[in-house]
């Protein structure tokens, strides 16, 4: 079905991806909407899209080709249409099903709500999936970065990101403080800002179910529920309980708990069973650094997932190559993990790896694994030749520092 746009022109080439019998039906020239992003977004997008196109061309000899279709959000949307997030952008992603974006600026302490979070919530892209693994020769603070191979499933629609909050001294905050004091007996200090942290059974179970499905499809060994349930008992603690519940209810034949692993199997993981375990969030950060081998798929809530994804990225080279995707049941919006890095905007300097590898996840999502593999291999080769952007160059001996666009050139040469 054609999109019902208010302001955008229709794409002039390509065909829409459709869903048939519950599966994506991907034509050879799919229309893929993209948002360039703010700050360094234009630099990294220009570089990454060239590499994606070259890999697809090489893998399929011109038989397949992405029909890129620009849609708008952030500063470019504001300049062009006077809106930060035009409705047509949501309509385009809903219609064309798979899209990709660069980073978008969010003002701190006031101003408009995060456009990144709004996109996730409006499109109900409930799983933020962020794989973290090491590429050969990438500089890392760990002795054995090759032991890091985790995939974060971060709940993407709830938690303190819901935007249910009021400023200190506002009428709403004062009313809530009175209500909590008088009706609930909860003593909240006057002149406090108030934020609400909703965590639902529905949101928690569908996220954990998605993480377990991923673990099954990808032969992963464990799913760890990361929470701060000792302190936030009815939100984070409930997430943990619902996580175990959904594992038992829907995946009881292929999962065991860590307790069962020790009590019934003597610590030896039985073939074909995924271990469901949980860790409290603070110790999880330490364990991920010291004993990364023990962890595989991680399922957690929005704020923990945001913190964890940047921290884990640091273990394998940093945010410059950390990819991600926001995924619902079919709709998917691929997205760099980092932000707009405004101090480098327009300098053709930063690493395009994060948005590029997000594009590679997108190729895999389309089933274009041959093109994806070409890029992974080229990335390995280029980094092992020590031709890298500034972020790696400053941590590597004997590296040749290249610009963002030159790194893309080298990746294309090495495809
Ligand atoms: N999904 C999204 O769109 C996101 C948007 N944001 C938004 O981005 C803005 C800036 O946020 P900020 O907290 O500064 O985080 P950023 O991720 O934009 O930048 C922090 C630091 O990370 C490093 N970095 C970022 N991108 C790259 C890259 N491509 N290659 C190499 N290094 C990189 C730089 O480190 P160094 O200084 O050491 O060189 C940079 O100064 C805010 O408005 C924030 O809300 C933030 C996160 C996600
Ligand atoms: O929306 C933002 O500005 C920040 C989002 C973010 O940090 C993330 O999704 O990792
Ligand atoms: Mg973040």
Image (cartoon, rainbow, N blue to C red):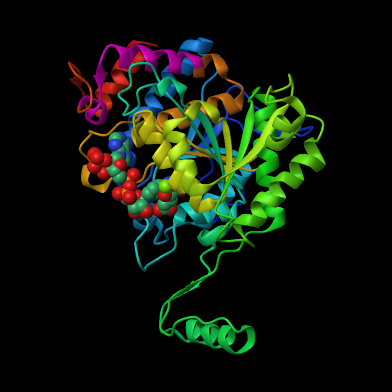
The answer to which of 386 and 62 lies nearer the viewer is 386
Residue at (51%, 59%) from the top-left corner? Answer: 161
Whether residue 1 appears in this view of the structure is no
Residue at (37%, 57%) from the top-left corner? Answer: 106
The rendered magenta stretch, by its main secondary structure, is classed as helix
- Indicate the position of residue 196 as horizontal and vertical percent values: 54, 69
Magenta stretch: includes residue 65 = no
The image quadrant that residue 330 belongs to is top right
| Magenta-tinted stretch | 373-393
The image quadrant that residue 289 belongs to is top left
Q: As drawn, is 212 to the left or to the right of 309?
A: right
The answer to which of 284 and 42 lies nearer the viewer is 284
Residue at (38%, 31%) from the top-left corner? Answer: 315
The image quadrant that residue 23 belongs to is top right
Magenta stretch: includes residue 382 = yes
Residue at (32%, 26%) from the top-left corner? Answer: 140
Q: Is residue 221 above or below residue 129?
A: above
Q: Quadrant of the N terminus?
A: top right
- Indicate the position of residue 364 as horizontal and vertical percent values: 57, 24
Whether residue 50 appears in this view of the structure is yes
Q: As drawn, is 319 to the left or to the right of 372?
A: left
Q: Is residue 133 above or below residue 252?
A: above
- Indicate the position of residue 283 as horizontal and vertical percent values: 48, 44
Q: As drawn, is 21 to the left or to the right of 90?
A: right
- Indicate the position of residue 381 as horizontal and vertical percent values: 35, 11
């Amino acid at each position: 079905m054609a999109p019902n746009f208010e302001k955008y022109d229709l794409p002039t080439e390509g065909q829409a991806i459709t869903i048939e019998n519950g599966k994506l039906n991907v034509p050879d020239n799919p229309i893929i909407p993209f948002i360039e992003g703010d700050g360094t977004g234009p630099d990294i997008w220009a570089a990454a899209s060239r590499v994606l196109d070259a890999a697809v061309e090489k893998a399929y000899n011109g038989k397949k080709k992405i029909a890129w279709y620009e849609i708008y959000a952030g500063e470019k949307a504001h300049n062009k249409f006077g809106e930060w997030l035009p409705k047509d952008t949501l309509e385009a992603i809903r219609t064309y099903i798979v899209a990709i974006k660069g980073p978008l600026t969010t003002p701190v302490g006031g101003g408009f709500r995060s456009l990144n979070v709004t996109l996730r919530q409006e499109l109900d892209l409930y799983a933020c999936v962020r794989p973290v693994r090491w590429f050969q020769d990438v500089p890392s603070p760990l002795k054995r970065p090759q032991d890091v191979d985790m995939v974060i499933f971060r709940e993407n629609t709830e938690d303190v990101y819901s935007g249910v909050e009021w400023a200190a001294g506002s009428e709403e905050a004062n009313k809530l403080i009175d209500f909590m004091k008088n009706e609930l007996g909860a003593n909240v200090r006057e002149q406090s800002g108030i934020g609400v942290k909703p965590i639902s059974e529905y949101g928690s179970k569908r996220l954990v179910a998605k993480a377990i499905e991923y673990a099954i499809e990808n032969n992963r060994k464990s799913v760890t529920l990361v929470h701060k349930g000792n302190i936030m008992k009815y939100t984070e603690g409930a997430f943990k309980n619902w996580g175990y519940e959904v594992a038992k209810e829907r995946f009881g034949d292929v999962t065991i708990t860590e307790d069962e692993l020790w009590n019934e199997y003597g610590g030896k993981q039985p073939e074909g069973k995924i271990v469901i375990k949980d860790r409290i969030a603070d110790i999880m950060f330490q364990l991920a650094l010291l004993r990364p081998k023990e962890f595989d798929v991680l399922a957690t809530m929005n704020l923990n997932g945001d913190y964890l994804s940047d921290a884990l990225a640091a273990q394998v080279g940093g945010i410059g190559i950390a990819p991600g995707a926001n995924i619902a049941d079919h709709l998917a919006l691929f997205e760099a993990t980092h932000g707009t890095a405004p101090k480098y905007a327009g300098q053709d300097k930063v690493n395009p790896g994060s948005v590029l590898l997000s594009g590679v996840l997108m190729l895999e999502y389309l089933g274009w694994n041959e093109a994806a593999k070409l890029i992974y291999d080229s990335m390995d080769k280029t980094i092992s030749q020590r031709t890298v952007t500034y972020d790696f160059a400053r941590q590597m001996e004997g590296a040749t520092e290249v610009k963002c666009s030159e790194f893309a050139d080298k990746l294309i040469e090495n495809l």
